[in-house]
Image (cartoon, rainbow, N blue to C red):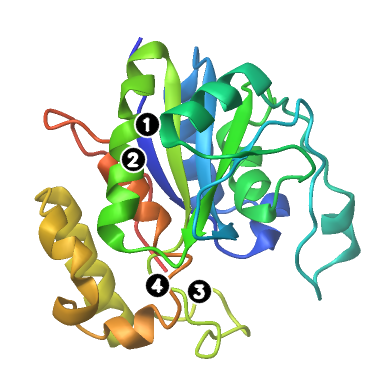
Amino acid sequence: MQMPSLFIAHAAPSIAIEHDDYTRALRKAGQSLRGARAIVLASAHWQTRNTTRVNGMPQPPLIYDFGGFSDELYSVRYDAPGDPELAREVASMLDAPLELARGWDHGVWTPLIHLVPDASIPIVEISLPFPAEPQQLLDIGRKLAPLRDRGIVIAGSGGIVHNLSLIKLTDKHVPADSWAIEFDEWIATRVRDRDFESLTRYRQLAPHAARAVPTPEHFEPLFIACGASHDDDALHEIHAGM
């Protein structure tokens, strides 16, 4: 059974305890993952210098890698298992070392708590190499793509527009700035058209790229998800919004 390649905007950690249009969209999308053997996920919140690493722990603890949120968030549990056997296989596919002493950052568990609320699917997290070129990240996705035909989901967790210095914290429903919408729509069009060559040059070609992506770590998991796609894949948008 072929599984999808996903890109998930994980937003603020507080989505783990929120219920809105976005989290409902994640729960609906999660229905397509029923029957998955595992999820291999690259998160914006795990970067390792020069190389990808693969988490091979059988039961990684949660990392509460944030501050300033409600006390409730720091008691959230997500007890999905790891998959050491699959982690070793992924490490071999990527020529990457195993990590045996790291938990899951919030880029893993905050979206998955809605996508797979019963925590029934094993997870193998991979890190983003730092620094990395977009083509290198596409190649990581391409190497992982055959796993989809074995019932394994490939996922990137990050964000298209991610500029914390310009975020409006007083009201999450405030209209988005025009520059953010223009950048988001440019990226969405390139993904729909499978124009990955232009996508790799987003810093030169996309409007307002420096403002939308001041640092690349949240954007980079998109390349892994695109690289893991097949030419005949249908594109399904989980949710559109800011």
**For the residue carrying disc 4, how many other residues have a C-alpha within 10 Å: few (<14), some (14-19), or many (20+)?**
many
Screen quadrant of the N terminus: top left
Q: Residue at x 69, y 25 (%)?
A: 118
Q: Is residue 215 left or right of residue 181?
A: right
Q: Which mark is residue 161?
A: 4
Mark 2 or 4: the one toward you: 2
Q: Nearer the viewer, residue 156 or 128?
A: 128
Give residue 210's quadrant in the image. Answer: bottom left
206 over 87 or under it: above or below: below
**Residues under labels 4 and 1: Cα distance?**
25 Å
Per the image, label 4 sits on a secondary structure element best described as: loop
Per the image, label 2 sits on a secondary structure element best described as: helix
Q: Which mark is residue 173?
A: 3
x and y percentages locating residue 169 in the rendered image: 61, 83
Q: Is residue 181 visible from the viewing direction of this image?
A: yes
Give residue 135's quadrant in the image. Answer: bottom left
Mark 4 or 1: the one toward you: 1
**Residues under labels 2 and 4: Cα distance?**
21 Å
Q: Residue at x 57, y 54 (%)?
A: 20
Q: Is residue 15 left or right of residue 63?
A: left
Screen quadrant of the C terminus: bottom left
Mark 4 or mark 1, which has the lower sequence index?
A: 1
Q: Residue at x 80, y 70 (%)?
A: 69
Q: Which residue is mark 1?
A: 144
202 over 199 or under it: above or below: below
| Amino acid type, mark 4 | Val
Q: Which mark is residue 141?
A: 2
**Residues under labels 4 and 3: Cα distance?**
16 Å
Q: Are marks 1 and 2 in contact (CB under 8 Å)?
A: yes
Per the image, label 1 sits on a secondary structure element best described as: helix
**Residues under labels 1 and 2: Cα distance?**
5 Å
